[in-house]
């Protein structure tokens, strides 16, 4: 059974259609990247998968629970946690430790369990040294890591990231993408990531391309024609024309820089 399923889902904001006829099946342990230009419906979809909003038509289920079932909302959000681009609104504790502990205390867990869960998830996310820091003083990347740690602490099975990494510099971004892939590989964590960067989709198990509120393509990265829209892809093809070998997969500025730095060109 799929972990997350959308069946015939449409969503309108005050009569304005943002998504229409979305069918999507996300298996447990999949790494899914949702691509699409501004306004294509990525954030709307991310919020539908986490029961923040409910479909105007159709239904979404998470681990067998319909998001429209009020009694399941807590379980759904525990199973599939959402990380946003600006995590400040999601941070509540005065220290990193407190921020993670808050939800666990609400679940009535014994303090010694809470302590060991926190030790574990801080180690997994590389935040051990920040345990007693004020979360508001963390860097953007560390704040994203704290949100991820919070979801791991709740034994979340799926992390949904809505362009959560788009404001980070390349180093922090790569660090978090690597962490997500590691958690996916080693712990079977399901990852659903929205992005405008086609490079993110290359290592995904499933790529879903949205345009104007509809799924216009979905499948494995090699089966989905990821339309290169970047300046980088045209520079890469010009280089190829001049017999500089640049992989066909280079479609973003990041990828182009990496490819050129391997050749010692930058
Ligand atoms: N709160 C809102 N009220 C009214 N319309 C909205 C609202 N949020 C989004 N929309 C509209 O719904 C459509 C889909 O928006 P959405 O934010 O889901 O797209 P997106 O792919 O996440 O875009 P971006 O890449 O800019 O984040 C757009 O036409 C947008 O204008
Ligand atoms: Mg968005």
Image: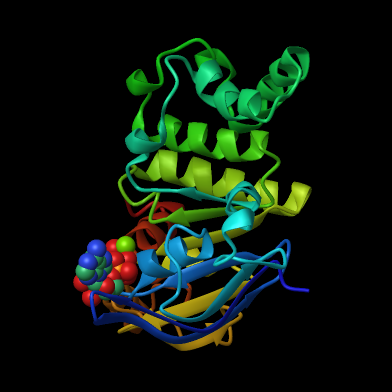
The residue at 41%/72% (across/down) is: 35
> Looking at this view, is 13 or 41 the one in front?
13
**Quarter of the image holding residue 128?**
top right
How many numbered marks appear?
0
Give the residue drawn at x 45%, y 63%: 46
Q: Position of residue 137 (x, y in %)?
A: 34, 19
Image: 180 above or below 137 = below
Seen in the image, is 18 located left or right of residue 131? left
Residue 5 visible in image: yes
Does residue 252 appear left or right of residue 130 in this picture?
Answer: left
> Is residue 121 depicted above or below 228 in this figure?
above
Task: Identify the residue at horizontal 66%, vertical 33% (top origin).
Answer: 153
Q: Quadrant of the N terminus?
A: bottom right
Tell me where residue 93 sits by quadrant: top left
Compared with 240, 190 (above or below) is: above
Farthest top residue in view:
132
Choose between 256 and 240: the one closer to the eye. Answer: 256
Work out whether residue 39 can be spotted: no
Which of 58 and 205 lies nearest the eye of the viewer?
A: 58
């Amino acid at each position: 059974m799929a972990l997350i399923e959308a069946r015939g889902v449409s969503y309108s904001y005050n009569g304005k259609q943002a998504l229409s006829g979305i069918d999507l099946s996300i298996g447990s342990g999949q790494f899914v990247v949702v691509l699409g230009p501004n306004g294509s419906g990525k954030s709307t979809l991310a919020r539908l998968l986490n029961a923040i909003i409910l479909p105007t038509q159709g239904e979404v289920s998470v681990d067998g629970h319909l998001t429209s079932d009020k009694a399941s909302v807590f379980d759904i959000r525990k199973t599939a946690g959402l990380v946003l681009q600006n995590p400040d609104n999601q941070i509540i504790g005065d220290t990193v430790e407190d921020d993670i502990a808050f939800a666990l205390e609400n679940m009535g867990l014994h303090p010694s369990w809470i302590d060991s869960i926190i030790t574990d998830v801080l180690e997994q996310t590389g935040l051990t040294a920040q345990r007693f820091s004020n979360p508001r003083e963390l860097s953007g990347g560390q704040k994203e890591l704290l949100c991820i740690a919070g979801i791991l602490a709740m034994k979340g099975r799926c992390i949904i990231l809505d362009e959560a990494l788009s404001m980070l510099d390349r180093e922090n971004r790569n660090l978090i993408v690597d962490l997500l892939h590691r958690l996916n590989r080693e712990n079977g964590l399901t990852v659903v990531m929205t992005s405008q960067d086609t490079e993110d989709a290359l290592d995904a198990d499933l790529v879903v391309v949205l345009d104007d509120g509809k799924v216009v393509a979905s499948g494995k990265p090699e089966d989905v024609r990821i339309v290169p829209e970047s300046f980088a892809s045209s520079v890469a093809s010009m280089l190829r024309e001049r017999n500089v070998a640049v992989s066909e997969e280079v479609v973003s500025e990041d990828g182009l820089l990496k490819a050129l730095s391997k050749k010692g060109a930058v």
